[in-house]
Image (tube, helix red, strand yellow):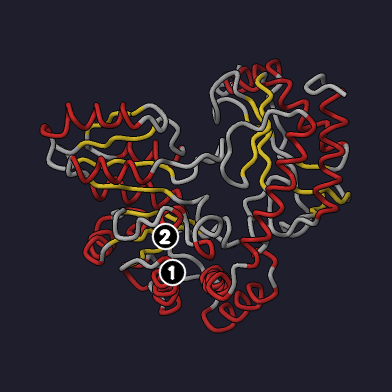
Amino acid sequence: MSKLDFIDQRLNELKKQGVYRILPINEGPCANIITLQGKPIVNLSANNYLGLATHPRVIQAAKNAIDHYGAGAGSVRTIIGNQDLLEELENVLAAFKGEEAVTVFQSGLNCNIGVIQALTDVGDLIISDELNHASIIDGVKLSKADKVVYQHSNMAHLEELLKTKRNNYAQVLIITDGVFSMDGDLANLPEIVKLAEKYDALTYVDDAHGSGVLGQGGRGTVDHFHLHSKIDIIVGTLSKAVGVIGGYVCSKKNVKEWLLHRARPLLFSTALPPAAIGAAIESVKLLMESDDLTKRLWSNAQYFKNGMLNLGFDIGHSETPITPVMIGDEAKTMAFSKALLAEGVFVSGIVFPTVAKGKGRLRVMLSASHTLSDLTFALDKFKKVGIALDIIHP
């Protein structure tokens, strides 16, 4: 008997449930068409909303950064990893987002696990939406503050918690996703801001799926709702619409100063590599120059959503290009994903624990890089597989 036999037992249980998966291996760039096992496949699962991961200017900026700065930063930011290129990225992001200051982290996850614990302490309270991203949940767990959860986007429940608990704490921090990544719906930021002002609470929005997608020129969910200066902390990512890797936090300058002293991912993990920084700068500059890619993304999303509705699929209540195709049963969800792949379309199945049991879905991620031919092909395959699995009817 091996001490790790229990792992085999757990893996076998996943196989019995029909949710065991083998990771696909992409043999080329993350684009509208990818290569899996030597075959061209329509890719409907990337977060590369605007296609910037393969934009020629972005690729060239990465190469230029390597030539000048080398392959790695060589240190955490607080020692000698704070290169001038990283400072430039923060300035460009602050200008793009229309915020006072920006602090760049190694990922969006690192933003949440670093910022939440740095801002809150014993004697504080965190109030978090029940469908917030896993990185927020982990960040909240690392805090010494007390924690409560409000029902998803239920403003009456949020106010009830504020009313009964606010006077018991020094600081209260309301945390929400801007765009909820599994369903594609938006947080009710205008009402959250009103409640925060009424009860003297801080506001924290993770806008990973809103940046580059919503607002003027892709400036995000806060811009979409015209709430500049009303949100205390805005988290964004450089790995989705920007097409590279990394995360950033918009805040007041004094908050940035504090994070540079107390946010643990900045203190204990090497800074972003120069290639990623140079590429991200160029991507943001492209967003500032034109909103053509954002408009194309939304046009593609509308075309695909209309097609799926006409076929009879349940695509939930998404308000963004994130398009969940609701299946329910976990095993059937994974079978649908596998059958689509055999037909030349890659869409990842999302099952427990990423979503609640019985809420399995395929999550379609549209991109500006998709052609109408790509999307028409995908719709035809969804129809074929959906009928075969008795999810829709001819």
**Residue extending furthest toward the bottom:** 68
Q: Position of residue 123 (x, y in %)?
A: 14, 37
**Which one is in front, 213 or 309?**
309
Residue 9, quarter of the rendered image: top right
Q: Is residue 81 visible?
A: no
Where disc 1 sits, the SS reads: helix
Q: Residues within 10 Å of mark 2 (few under 14, many from 20)?
A: many
Pointers 1 and 2 in contact (CB under 8 A)?
Answer: yes
Q: Position of residue 2 (x, y in %)?
A: 59, 21
Label 1 is placed on what type of residue?
A: Leu
**Which one is in front, 43 or 10?**
43
Would residue 310 appear left or right of 245 to someone viewing this image?
Answer: right
Q: Position of residue 183 (x, y in %)?
A: 56, 35
Q: Is residue 77 visible?
A: yes
Q: Which residue is mark 2?
A: 248
Q: Residues within 10 Å of mark 1 (few under 14, many from 20)?
A: many
Label 2 is placed on what type of residue?
A: Tyr
Q: Quick one: quadrant of the C terminus?
A: top right
Where disc 2 sits, the SS reads: strand
Q: Which residue is mark 1?
A: 93
Residue 367, quarter of the rendered image: bottom right
Nearer the camera: disc 1 or disc 2: 1
Q: CA distance from mark 1 to mark 2?
A: 8 Å
Residue in the picture at 38% in, 26% down:
151
Residue in the picture at 62% in, 27% down:
351
Q: Is residue 225 above or below residue 143?
A: below
Q: Position of residue 204 (x, y in %)?
A: 33, 48
Residue in the picture at 40% in, 41% down:
188
**Which one is in front, 128 or 146?**
128
Q: Tell me which numbered mark, 1 or 2, is placed earlier along the sequence.
A: 1
Q: Is residue 31 above or below residue 206?
A: below
